[in-house]
Amino acid sequence: MKVLELKFRNADDKIVTLSLDAPVEPVDPALINTVMDTIVTENAFISSGGDLVKKESARIVERQVTDITLG
């Protein structure tokens, strides 16, 4: 399963991560940048450490799960 992680700095200078399941690929870096700017500008989310004040990074994380059969 893939997840798009948007990372921001909050008012306490801590990292806050917003995770979105099943991102559209290929990703559009310009669109992600615009969306992150909008989140900060519109104060769309707040965290326990205050408002999101700065973009930090964005990344796609892929997680692979393999079940193990137990005897």
Image (cartoon, rainbow, N blue to C red):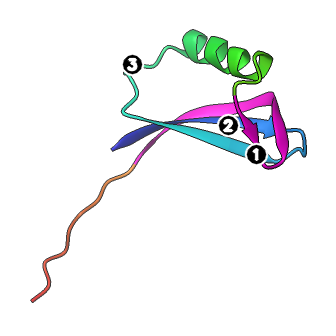
- Picture quadrant where residue 62 is located: top left
What residue is shown with label 3? 26
**Residue in the image at 62% along x and 16% along y:** 35
- Nearer the N terminus, badge 2 or badge 3? 2
Q: Amino acid at mark 3?
A: Pro
The local crowd at label 3, few if under 14, some if 14 to 19, many if 20 or more residues have their Cα within 10 Å, is: few
Residue 69 vs 35, above or below: the answer is: below
Find the distance from the CA under tag 1 to the CA under tag 2: 6 Å
The answer to whether 6 is drawn above or below residue 49 in the figure is above
Q: Quadrant of residue 70?
A: bottom left
In-image side of 28 versus 50 (left or right): left
**Residue farthest toward the right in the current orientation of the protein:** 12
Residue 48 forms part of the magenta stretch: yes
Residue 23 against residue 66 in the figure, above or below: above
Per the rendering, the mark at residue 64 is none
Residue range in magenta is 45-62
- Residue drawn at the location 79% of the way across and 16% of the way down: 41
Kindly indicate the quadrant of the structure image that contains residue 1. top left
In this view of the protein, which residue sits in the foreground, 19 or 29?
A: 19
For label 2, count other residues whose C-alpha is less than 10 Å away and answer few (under 14), some (14-19) or many (20+). some
Residue 5 placed where, x, y %? 56, 37
> What amino acid does circle 1 point to?
Ile
Residue 18 lies, in percent from the top left, at: 60, 38
Tag 1 residue: 15
Where is mark 2, residue-wise? 7
Q: Secondary structure at mark 2?
A: strand
Q: Is residue 50 left or right of residue 70?
A: right
Categorize mark 1 by other alpha carbons within 10 Å: few (<14), some (14-19), many (20+). Answer: some
Q: Is residue 32 above or below residue 51?
A: above
